[in-house]
Image: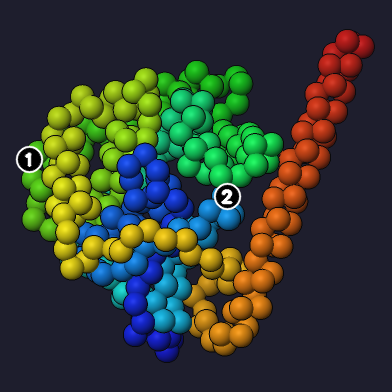
Amino acid sequence: MEGDQDTSGGFTLVTRKPCFGLPTACPNCLPAYIYLKLAQLPFQLAFNSTFPDSDELPYFETGTYVAYNNEEGGVIEKLKKDGVVNLDSQLQSLPDYLSLKALILSWLEEALAYEMWVGTEGVSAWKIYYSDLPWVISKVLFYKQTYMAKTRLGIIKENSEEREKQIYKRASDAYEALSTRLGEHKFLFEDRPSSLDAFFLSHILFAIQVLPETSVLRTKLLEHGNLVRYAEKLKLEFLEAPSSSSSPPLHSFPSSFSRKGSKPKGKSKTEKTEEEKKFKKRAKFFLAAQFLAVVIYLSVMGGVSNDELEYEDDE
């Protein structure tokens, strides 16, 4: 554990809201939730939907220790590095570990992002991230995030069909390789869970329960019966069966996003109360700023497009 941070308190994982029959429908949050369940670490589950496009979610807290999603490779990597809980300590030297990690965290993650924002026209994404916001704001942020997702995926008008074929081809190859590797074993590494199981189980549950039945990615996944059985068994044992590590009912968690890094939270109760008074004001400012930024962006882009058309006409 880094520094002298206190971890004597209870454990809390803060995620985006539950949806589609999942404890959290956020594809970034669900792996962290499953990882803690596989590790059988008792924790409380809380959710925060105030900042829908914050990259700090999920985050994990205990005592004065906080691990955010946007630091050091994400929450799971941070927990492993800091010695809070590490399921991979004896697996990372295995020859298959890095290759499986690349398939799951590169090809399948890319395919899921494509399917969420492009392939299914963002139907599920809107419900997960923006359905709690005012209609106009939710639509503006949704279109902004869709544009950003296409940019991250390297999709432009000229290569959209080629990229789609490439993404689905890689996903099919990944499913085939993982299906062969898994066989009928309980975990990817036979008799012990790992962070890769958390990521892969999250991917399968998300694809089956969140993506619509018309989803190409979902259809490709369902072609591999052993992958579906793998997910069903682990879901039943670790996510649905009552145990000592079961989290309590979901509840709202009013936590500030002004904290950066894993820093001690030494604020007094009075200071926290004052901060919470300002929380709603910051949230409203955030929404207004996002809306204004997108409107300005769309105005500028519209002006650029018109200038290009006029230039072409002059030629």
Determine the secondary structure under disc 1: loop
Identified at 41% across, 28% down, the residue is 167
Residue type, label 2 = Asp
Residue in view at x 44 percent, y 69 percent: 67
Residue 9 relative to residue 227: left or right: right
Residue position for label 2: 53
Number of the front mark, 1 or 2 = 2
Quadrant where the C terminus is found in the figure: top right
Query: Residue 81 sits in which quadrant?
Result: bottom left
| Amino acid marked by disc 1 | Glu
Please give the residue where the numbered disc 1 appears in the rendered image: 184
Residue 3, placed above or below residue 307: below
In the shown orientation, is residue 300 left or right of residue 208?
right
Q: Nearer the viewer, residue 260 or 22?
A: 22
Provide residue 257's location: percent of width, then percent of height. 58, 66
Q: Secondary structure at mark 2?
A: loop
Q: Name the residue located 69 percent from the left edge and 62 percent from the top edge.
A: 282
Q: Is residue 130 above or below residue 239?
A: above
Mark 2 Cα within 10 Å, few/some/many (few <14, many 20+)?
few
- Label drawn at residue 39: none
- The answer to whether residue 303 is visible is yes
Q: Is residue 79 visible?
A: no
Left of 222 or right of it: where is 218?
right
